[in-house]
Amino acid sequence: MTSDAKATLAGPPMTPVLRSLLAAARAAEPKLVDRLRRLVEAESPSHNKAAVDRATALVAEWCRETGAQCILHPQGAVGDSLEARFGSPDPSRRPVLVLGHLDTVWEMGTLSNMPWREEGDRIAGPGVLDMKGGVVMALAALEILGLRDLPFCPTILLLHADEEIGSPASRALTEGIAAECSAVYVLEPGEGAAGAYKTARKGVGQFRLDVRGVGSHAGVDFGSGHSAVLELARQLERVAALSDPAAGVTVNPGVMGGGTRSNVVAAEAWAEIDVRLPSVGEADRVEQRLRSLQAVDPACTVSVTGAVNRPPMVRTPAIAGMFERAQRYAFEMGLEPLTEAATGGASDGNFTAALGVPTLDGMGAVGGGAHAAHEHLLRPFLAPRTALLAAMLL
């Protein structure tokens, strides 16, 4: 730990309070795991509104038991968002936003092949790491603070149902609530085996490149045709050249298609492009370059649609300060050293950080295999991470 981190907290050491939080979190672990199992077994794929709403209703019930005031925000065709407010309103203090989601990438019926499993230190199941573990940890942290009658910041727990599909419906709600908050804690999984907190994330863009050519019979009238597939191939070389891994910029044409039959000169072709960007400047540059693509074959036309849908989360001095506070608390609790990381993945924390609200991400569970068949969390991290989250709410 740096000397700056050790000096982050003023006043008397908080070690006795912090270690009492850790003891309380360990005592609360059986209840936390029981809730986690119930939530994992409430399957909640993003595109199934009824299913994800059932998971949301379950969490809302637990929030009310903890004394929260709950509001369900309808989000059209996707599941409702849950806003739960904890603690007494205090006009002199802006609340803290604890941000997460209840939707998963797993379709209904996944439990039949990927059931809840407790195997040694591992707990496995669909969505257990990303991010139902973080949700039940947040509830446990708030319960611990309430039961011990410790003063904590007014807290808003905001859980969405469309994060895994880019938050198209919930983004405005996230930004509106974040604007009234002093800080944002994101319940996404920690990074790597040690569960590093995330202090920076790349922005994400999703683009589609469409090419229109001139179709013709490949055998009878080949010379009249102008292949959209060939033009797409030329354009993809230009697109790939926009990547600059040394600068943290990656441009990946990941899906493509075109043409109808091998004996037809293709009249249409397309590609879907994923872009990851470390800064707003790079986002503007890459988007401008994509939109300025011109056809090599003058008989073809090229068009680009899409946008950067999640702005970069840039590590600011305020974010660094929040991380140093968490690092100090972990030190005083006697936990393993807390580290920080930057990642190419995005979360709803990208939106809040872009507003200028200090955002600390990766504060949820620790494990591996998110979005994969071996998704799991590591049980030994549950109580320490829950206690650390509770400490950050003091």
Image (cartoon, rainbow, N blue to C red):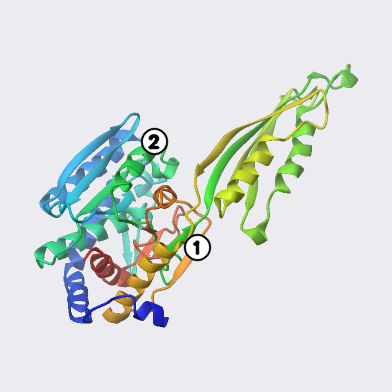
Precedes in sequence: disc 2 or disc 1: 2
Tell me, yes or no, whether the two marked residues, 2 and 1, touch with CB atoms within 8 Å: no
Q: Residues within 10 Å of mark 2 (few under 14, many from 20)?
A: many
User: Which label number is shown at residue 356?
Assistant: none
Q: Specify the amino acid type for callout 1.
A: Ala
Of residues 35 and 97, the one drawn nearer to the viewer in this rendering:
97
SS label for mark 1:
strand
Quadrant, the C terminus = bottom left
The residue carrying pointer 1 sits among few (fewer than 14), some (14 to 19) or many (20 or more) residues within 10 Å by Cα, namely some
- Report whether 190 appears left or right of 270: left
Residue 285, visible in the rendered structure: yes
Furthest toward the front, the residue is: 92
Q: Which residue is mark 2?
A: 47
Q: Secondary structure at mark 2?
A: loop
Query: On the image, numbered disc 1 is attached to which residue?
Result: 342
Marks 2 and 1, how far apart in space? 29 Å
In the rendered view, would you say 48 is above or below 243?
above
Q: Is residue 341 above or below residue 266?
A: below
Location of residue 107 in the rendering, given as x and y in whole percent from the top left corner: 40, 42
Q: Is residue 221 left or right of residue 383?
A: right
Left of 130 or right of it: where is 272?
Answer: right
Q: What is the three-letter code of the residue carrying label 2? A: His
